[in-house]
Image: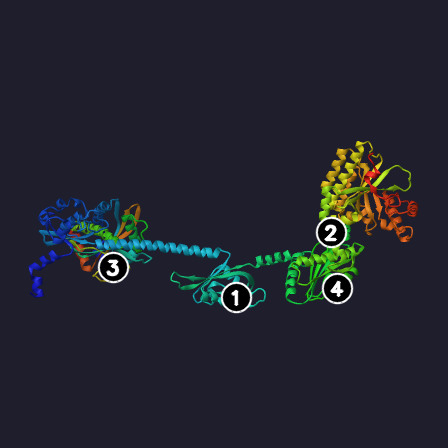
Amino acid sequence: MSAEELIESPFIFQHIFSESESGLVIIDSEFSVVDCNPWFIKYSGIELKEIKGKSLTKVFPILEKSSIERGVVSALKNGMSSVVSHTLNRKPFPLKNIAGQPLQQQITIKPIILDDKQRYCLIQIMDISASFNRERQLLEQAKRTKAITAKLADEKERAQVTLNSIIDAVITTDEQGLILSMNPVAEFLIGVREEDVQNKRVCDYFKLINEQNYNIISCPVDECLQSKNIIINEKEHILVGKSKRFSVHDSVSPIINDDGVMLGTVVVFRDVTQSRALAEELNWQALHDPLTGLANRRQFELDMHTLLNKAKSDNLKHHLLYLDLDQFKVVNDTCGHDAGDELLKQITAILDNKLRKSDVLARLGGDEFGVLLESCDAENALAVANNLRQAVEGFRFGWQARSFKIGVSIGIAEITGEEAKASEVLSAADAACYVAKESGRNRVCFHEINASASSMHQKEMQWVSRLQAALDNDCFELFLQRIQCVECKDSDSDHYEVLLRMIDEYGETVPPGAFLPAAERFNLIGSVDTWVVEKVFEKLEGLREVNKYPENLILSINLSGTSMANIDLLDRISCLLDESGFPAKNFCFEVTETAAIANLKQATNFLSSLRSKGCKVALDDFGSGLSSFAYLKELPVDYLKIDGLFVKDIAVDEIDKAFVESINQIGQVMSLETIAEFVENDEIMGILTEIGVNYAQGYGIHKPCSFDLVFPKV
Amino acid sequence: MSDEKKILDDFYVDAVAEVLNVGMGSAAASLSEMIDDEVKLSVPGVEFVTRLVAADHISGKAKTDVSGVHQHFQGAFGGDAMLLFPEEQSLQLVRAVLQQDDMTLEDLTEMEQEAMTEIGNVILNSCLCSMADMFGKEMRGEIPEFVQGSINQVLTDDGNNQTEAIVLLLNMDFAVDKKNIQGYVTFLMDVDEVIQLKQNIQEFLGE
């Protein structure tokens, strides 16, 4: 059969009708089904005979008033074609696939008009389930993609805002180190704009140098790209920006994807110019004296430590000088701290001027200085020390029309490398300095292992335990020495100075000169003072019990400089006075001129308190301080005790006599009573009477003897 | 243009407008039933214009793309009927009918295009049927198709590629789901078909 014959054949259309892969239903003008193809039978699940000749809406009631029905009517009545869309049509044919799932349908309805009298309509149903599902999937996919895209855009925006907001500078590069992005802080620090440097080598802009030596530092981005490691640096880097330099902390991190491929780097850096400057300032302050700008004790010990280690390895000799100014306290106390500060500054300049650049000069304490002389033998060290001493000696410190002569005591110790610790050398030099001071100040003293003064200094250490034991076991004894009224030799006043003796473990009496310096130096003097005060009251109580309390008694009790700051002692004295009811005028408290001056303010407070209670106050060893008249106006005292050193030679030394005269005169003018110490014979007594000194005390008048002997109970 | 105006003066145009309004009434009823929501359709203006003028009207000043439904018809007179919207308006229509407010132009899938085609189909069929009824003549409408593109593409890709084609242009207002959507129904005819139309109208008016 030829193609033309095939087309002409009436069977071909029957075949097409049967084989069509869409549903075909033919409806006549009576709305009855004329025929439907096997596809439709298959998916509708209804036998052909059940459909044929029947009304469409009778077979499928669901189609009543549906778009399909309307389309069929429109085709049959008006000859119009219709499309019944899947989306809008809620009542399609009830067709199901083998799995029982409803078919998604697209339906077209076309009129077939053979002639005016014979009208039919063809309903064509296409299964669009596949494309419907595909489209639905695509739609969901698209929704997901859209959501992800939106999220990514949000993330990017957030990251961008974050980068723009943080105080760190951030640069990103690609895997070749070419700049991709730069945040505003990075733009500012480097001094470029992002758009001008994109795709340029980051190392041409992120330039670093070393803070100490200004050497160029190799670009950490290159290092990171090669090593794939995070490169962090938190010190010594300076970023060389286009117009300015900044101290920075910087880090470069590699960006590596899940497959281990290097995508680029992130450079993060921060301007730490201010904090680094602050840290340096703090560091400097921690190791330096703010007043003089010299190294402080800590720095000095560090330097010493270094030198000590050096001494161990080399054979060179190094020396340490320990300097103590002699008149600093006087300046500080009489002219105020401003003057003291100024003096220290000027002394610093003088000392510095006499030293080599390599020598270390440090301020170790109030008026103490240390000098490290590296590679300097003993002879040279001594020369340097003397140089310094002379320079200070020749200097006059002027302050408000007053001039002070300053001295310095210097101790020298050798750094041999055998010392275990820096502090060992320092205490050796300190001991030598102590010897220099004890030997009369303003001199230089070498530390020698067997130096007598120095070894005495060390021996004092042993006194600590002995003193402590003596205090615990009451191994002290009170002695009294009478103070005689010069004019009224026959008066019956009982005026005595209370003296202290220690009884050692062999029952021997130890004079105060042996143990008091140790007590002072090792902070036991406060306890000793308290012991004495309490003992005096105890003794007097004993006398009162047997009705032997002396009527016109004045007991002069010595207090140390340290006690001037001891509020507890002051309270104790008040308490004893109140409890005992003894007249306060029976008690006089003595403090040495030097001790009072050393703690002028505290001494003034302490002594004022005692006087306000009615006690007397005496200034001991007056005259030894030389510059001391100025203090007198400040100190609340009743008696001036003229230093015995001036008194004992008064008969033979005109100067001493003149001295005693002037002191006495000042005392009289100030309405103070004067007491001369060390009155050893009648000749001295005669001169004192002549001068007009009020009281005298000394071996010539009364040798100290035990309290109990002076005031026996029985 | 002026010739055609002579052929179809205001008297005829008014008659056509009246008939088409009846058609719109039945289209609105069908659409309301389809989408289960009230749809109102009205034809505020009918005019015969050239294709170019129609193009200007439809695409507006912004010359945006248009989309819509095209359906060929023949019978009492023949031509191409089209329901066209500026794209934004067509989107509004789909959004209103499908009640999916977040839909964008990119989201218009085949399914939505098909739905749009059905809506256009209902409206165009109603218009054609009302005219067939008026003239008491047989009309035959083909299967509609979705069209999209520039107005010039749409108005010329219709087989009747004649620049001198006459367009019976209807402004049409949709009111769906509290939205007002502007669309156009066009009947694109060549001169011969316009003469046919005029004769039909004359017959109808008993002239």
Q: Tell me whether the residue at label 1 lies in contact with that at label 2, contact meaning CB atoms closer than 8 angstroms.
A: no
Mark yes or no: residue A635 visible.
no
Can you identify the residue that label 2 sits on? A460
Q: Earlier in the sequence, mark 1 or mark 4?
A: 1
State which quadrant residue A490 falls in. Answer: top right
Question: Subunit of mark 4?
Answer: A
Q: Nearer the viewer, mark 4 or mark 2?
A: 2
Q: CA distance from mark 1 to mark 4?
A: 53 Å
Q: Tell me whether the residue at label 4 lies in contact with that at label 2, contact meaning CB atoms closer than 8 angstroms.
A: no
Q: Earlier in the sequence, mark 1 or mark 2?
A: 1
Q: Nearer the viewer, mark 1 or mark 2?
A: 2
Q: Residue at x 85, y 51 (%)?
A: A645
Q: Residues within 10 Å of mark 4 (few under 14, many from 20)?
A: many
Can you identify the residue that label 3 sits on? B155
Residue A207: mark: 1
Same chain? Circles 2 and 3:
no
Q: Earlier in the sequence, mark 4 or mark 2?
A: 4
- Counting every numbered tag in the picture gives 4
Could you say which is closer to the camera, residue A143 or residue A689? Answer: A689
Q: How is the image coloured?
A: rainbow
Could you say which is closer to the camera, residue B189 or residue A67? Answer: A67
Question: Subunit of mark 3?
Answer: B
Secondary structure of residue under mark 2: helix
Residue type pointed to by label 3: Leu
Question: Subunit of mark 2?
Answer: A
Secondary structure of residue under mark 4: helix
Can you identify the residue that label 4 sits on? A382
Q: Nearer the viewer, mark 2 or mark 3?
A: 2
